[in-house]
Image (cartoon, rainbow, N blue to C red):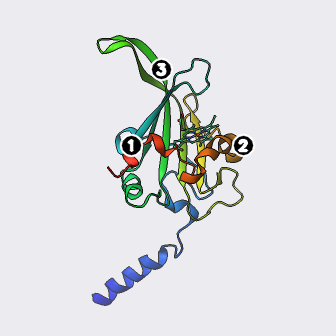
């Protein structure tokens, strides 16, 4: 009986790959580095903080809410680093404005327009994939095609603007109170 059990355990252990494949580290990343949009982040992740772009002429106009996994936020609070596999989601929602009893005008976020996603890769898994580099995988999803990563090259589509945050691992941490220890 004992031998049968040992054999069964050994067989199942051997059936598992000995080295984790590139896609195993994140539920949002496939083996080739394709990134999919987390859909459960509003209830399953923690909210890190918000930026608001109010200028009517700006392409970025909207409320920018940023989320990560609870465990990733806790890891950051302890170490000042995002752990391998951490996911950041920035959801931009359109702005609505109206007078309310708190003051005039009040601005809030309504329908989602786009989602920016970054997945931390501390091991350089996807060398040669133009959507991976500088320690992250980079993706952009638009509301009219939320299953398609609209970014083609992180260097062309993302990095120009994220250079000022180089000292904080490309993340604009100053707007995220959840990451602060107190
Ligand atoms: C026009 C400049 C610009 C471009 C282009 C840009 N970003 Fe950002 N991104 C920012 C700024 C500034 C912030 C923080 C302030 C804000 O949201 O307004 C930010 C924040 C983020 C955040 C939230 C976490 C953080 O880093 O603070 C994610 C995720 C993100 N960007 C992903 C991307 C991805 C992926 C791309 C490319 C597909 C991209 N960004 C392209 C300027 C840009």
Q: Residue at x 36, y 44 (%)?
A: 44
* Ligand 1 picture quarter: top right
Q: Identify the element where label 3 is drawn.
A: strand
Is residue 21 or residue 51 the one in the foreground?
51
155 over 101 or under it: above or below: below
Which is more foreground, mark 1 or mark 3?
A: 1
Label 1: few (<14), some (14–19) or many (≥20) C-alpha neighbours in 10 Å? few
3D distance between C-alphas at marks 1 and 3: 22 Å
Find residue 157 and name its label.
Answer: none
Rendering quarter of residue 67: top left
Which corner quadrant holds the N terminus?
bottom left
Which is more foreground, mark 1 or mark 2?
A: 1
Q: Identify the element where label 1 is drawn.
A: helix
158 over 58 or under it: above or below: below
Where is mark 2, residue-wise? 156
Where is mark 3, residue-wise? 95
Measuring from the top left, give residue 70's x and y in whole percent: 36, 51
3D distance between C-alphas at marks 1 and 2: 29 Å
Does residue 138 appear left or right of residue 177 in this picture?
A: right
Q: Residue at x 56, y 66 (%)?
A: 21
Task: Give the mark nearer the N terminus: 1 vs 2.
Answer: 2
Residue 166 at least partly seen: yes
73 over 39 or under it: above or below: below
Measuring from the top left, give residue 64's x and y in whole percent: 48, 32
Find residue 177 and name its label.
Answer: 1
Q: Identify the element where label 2 is drawn.
A: helix
Label 2: few (<14), some (14–19) or many (≥20) C-alpha neighbours in 10 Å? few
* Circle 2/circle 3 CB separation < 8 Å: no
Rendering quarter of residue 176: top left
Measuring from the top left, give residue 55's x and y in whole percent: 56, 20
Task: Give the mark nearer the N terminus: 2 vs 3.
Answer: 3
């Amino acid at each position: 009986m004992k031998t049968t059990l040992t054999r069964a355990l050994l067989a199942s252990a051997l059936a598992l790959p000995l080295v984790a494949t590139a896609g195993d580290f994140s539920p949002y990343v496939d083996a080739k580095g394709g990134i999919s949009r987390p859909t459960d982040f509003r209830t399953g992740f923690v909210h890190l903080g918000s930026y608001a772009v109010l200028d009517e002429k700006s392409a970025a106009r909207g409320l920018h809410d940023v989320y990560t996994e609870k465990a990733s936020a806790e890891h950051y609070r302890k170490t000042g680093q995002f752990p391998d596999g951490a996911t950041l989601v920035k959801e931009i929602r359109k702005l609505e404005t109206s007078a309310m009893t708190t003051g005039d005008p009040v601005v809030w976020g309504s329908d989602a327009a786009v989602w920016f996603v970054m997945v931390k890769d501390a091991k350089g898994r996807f060398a040669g994939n133009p959507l991976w580099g500088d320690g992250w995988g980079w993706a952009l999803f638009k509301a009219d095609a939320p299953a398609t990563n609209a970014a083609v090259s992180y260097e062309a589509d993302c990095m120009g603007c994220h250079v000022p945050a180089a000292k904080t691992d490309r993340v604009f941490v100053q707007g995220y109170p959840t990451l602060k220890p107190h």
